[in-house]
Amino acid sequence: MTAQSILRRHGRTVLLDFALLAGIYLLPSLSHLLALPIYLLEPMRIAVLIALLFSHRANAWLVAITLPLASFWMSGHPEPVKAVLMGIEFSVLIAAYAALRQTARLPAVVSIGAAIVAGKFVYYGSKAMVLSIGWLSGALVSTPWTLQLTTAAGTAVVFGLIEATRNK
């Protein structure tokens, strides 16, 4: 198979992946530019889920690890320590989702919801540790729990339904 035939065969996929990744990396910056508190809807987590469901798993890992750092580089938020914690949270989300879907064979809605909760547990556990040693200042929880749970449930339902319809 020649390079030209590979490009012809996979060119559309590469182009779609590039467009998807470009949009994902610009999403946090766009949310920072708007005067609305879009961060409350957790656009980075939504971007990771978009990469997970509509791209290759490797792209999802790349986005999970680099998106918070890219957001800091482009907009100054989140601060570097928090960006690392968010990268860990998103990585746990991907790993938990894969394990729940492939090993436990749970429905997509349940897998995404549980993966989000697993990521949040790791994030807040890590953040508590980082706060206690002084690497980060501020409150452990800055976004109200009720809003986080509502957003997580809504995200799980929307992306779970998308995933379920894609697999039929």
Image: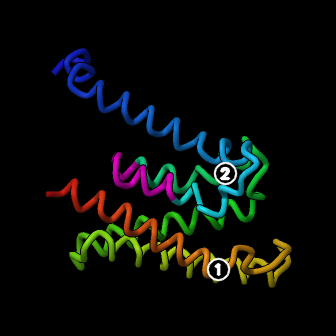
Determine whether label 1 and label 2 are within 8 Å by CB: no
Residue 37: x and y in percent read: 71, 57
Write down the quadrant of residue 157 in the picture: bottom left
Mark-to-mark CA distance, 1 and 2: 18 Å
Looking at the rendering, the stretch of residues picked out in magenta corresponds to 46-58
Q: Quadrant of the C terminus?
A: bottom left
Vertical placement of 115 versus 7: above or below? Answer: below
Q: Nearer the viewer, residue 41 or 8?
A: 41
Number of residues whose C-alpha sits closer than 10 Å to that of mark 1, classed few (under 14), some (14–19) or many (20 or more): some
- Residue at coordinates 37% horizontally, 27% vertically from top-left? 15
Name the residue at the front extreme. 36
Residue type, label 2: Leu
Residue to which mark 1 is pinned: 124
Q: For this view, does 1 lie left or right of residue 13?
A: left
Residue 24: x and y in percent read: 52, 43
Residue to which mark 2 is pinned: 69
Name the residue at the top extreme. 4
Q: Nearer the viewer, residue 60 or 164?
A: 164
Q: Nearer the viewer, residue 62 or 12?
A: 12
